[in-house]
Image (spheres, coloured by chain):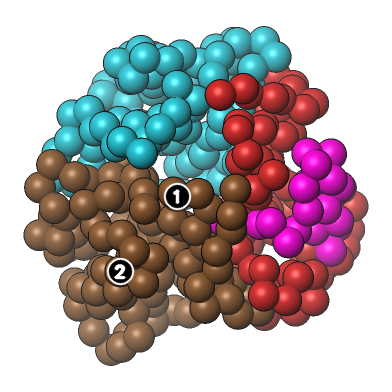
Chain colours: A red, B brown, C cyan
Amino acid sequence: MKIERINPAQHWSQIVIHGDVVYLVGTTADDTSQDVKGQTRQVLSTIDQLLARAGTDKTKLLTAQIWLRDINDWSKMNEIWDAWIAPGNAPTRATVEAKLARPDLLVEIMVQAAK
Amino acid sequence: MKIERINPAQHWSQIVIHGDVVYLVGTTADDTSQDVKGQTRQVLSTIDQLLARAGTDKTKLLTAQIWLRDINDWSKMNEIWDAWIAPGNAPTRATVEAKLARPDLLVEIMVQAAK
Amino acid sequence: MKIERINPAQHWSQIVIHGDVVYLVGTTADDTSQDVKGQTRQVLSTIDQLLARAGTDKTKLLTAQIWLRDINDWSKMNEIWDAWIAPGNAPTRATVEAKLARPDLLVEIMVQAAK
């Protein structure tokens, strides 16, 4: 089965497509002056763009992992997440606390979707 | 390839089936008055139920992620896990420490299985 | 679709192959007297061996998760990772900090590959 890589770099590829499964890179915010809600909005907007590049969209999400710098931000992150999810089309999910690559990163999300 | 979602809610779906791969939500215990062994038993019992709902079972596990609130609970969790695994049919696995959505949650497990 | 397990043990299987997707166990170093660079080298060497056992190689990586005991080791781990990745064939990836099964384990990596 064919493997397609979009924006492959040395550390990682932004998108890997294998058959009809789309893997996205763990995504973080560019503007980290924003709080966890703002960062979550940025992350989900980037995910929308990457899914579109892969020829799919958020109605086809399969599974998601969410890392929060501070697990106490769970409800704030969820507020933005819930508004973004296409009703009836939520992926499976796990959310845990973890320090991310830089201290100013408050949330990272990695998803898989169907094509 | 068809996507089937069982118990889709706003935060997540409990089960997503894509082709012959079954994704389960990250699962935690309902009765968090129990210790890590009791919580692991509850989690694995819930996973059994979800796998059955998806038309599969623990002999078809592909991969698992386990998060422990306290990594020192590794052996206690494993005692319950090992008794539950169908001999010869263990999934691949990674286990790390992480704070979970609430402080009383001591273990969370997320699995993928074949259908 | 067939499930093949290589080196199934009670805690986990080292390799699970389902269709043309290969799941590897979360891999850690054997010689934990080494620093994070040495441990990363060992982990990636083990992953090469496991991928070969599964009939595939690092040019077919789909996605990776990396856990660092100390996120400040990010650049050191990446130095080894970048040299290992087959140019143009990086998987998607997420890297977070987490305590691993033993305090002497500084890095754990879990990958999926195509067959």
Rendered view: A80 above or below A2 = below
Task: Give the class, few, some or many, for how many residues have Cα within 10 Å of label 1's Cα (few <14, many ≥20).
Answer: many
Rendered view: C30 above or below B61 = above
Relative image position of residue A12 (x, y in whole percent): 67, 28
**Which residue has dot 1 on it?**
B21
Task: Give the class, few, some or many, for how many residues have Cα within 10 Å of label 2's Cα (few <14, many ≥20).
Answer: few
Mark 2 or mark 1, earlier in chain: 1
Q: CA distance from mark 2 to mark 1?
A: 14 Å
Please report the residue visible at 58 percent of the width from the left and 58 percent of the height from the top. B3
Q: Is residue C92 left or right of residue A6?
A: left
**Which residue has dot 2 on it?**
B52
Rendered view: C95 above or below B56 = above
Residue B49 appears in the figure: yes
For badge 1, the amino acid type reads: Val
Viewer-proximal residue among B86 and C35: B86
Residue extent of the magenta highlight: A41-63
On residue B34, the disc is: none
Viewer-proximal residue among C21 and C77: C21
Q: Are marks 2 and 1 on the same chain?
A: yes
Relative image position of residue B104 (x, y in whole percent): 39, 81
Q: Which subunit holds the residue at mark 1?
A: B
Residue A93 appears in the figure: no
Please report the residue visible at 58 percent of the width from the left and 76 percent of the height from the top. B8
Please report the residue visible at 27 percent of the width from the left and 21 percent of the height from the top. C31
SS state under label 1: strand
* The stretch drawn in magenta includes residue A60: yes
Look at the magenta stretch and give its main secondary structure: helix
Relative image position of residue B114 (x, y in whole percent): 36, 49
For badge 2, the amino acid type reads: Ala
**Which picture quadrant has residue C82?**
top right
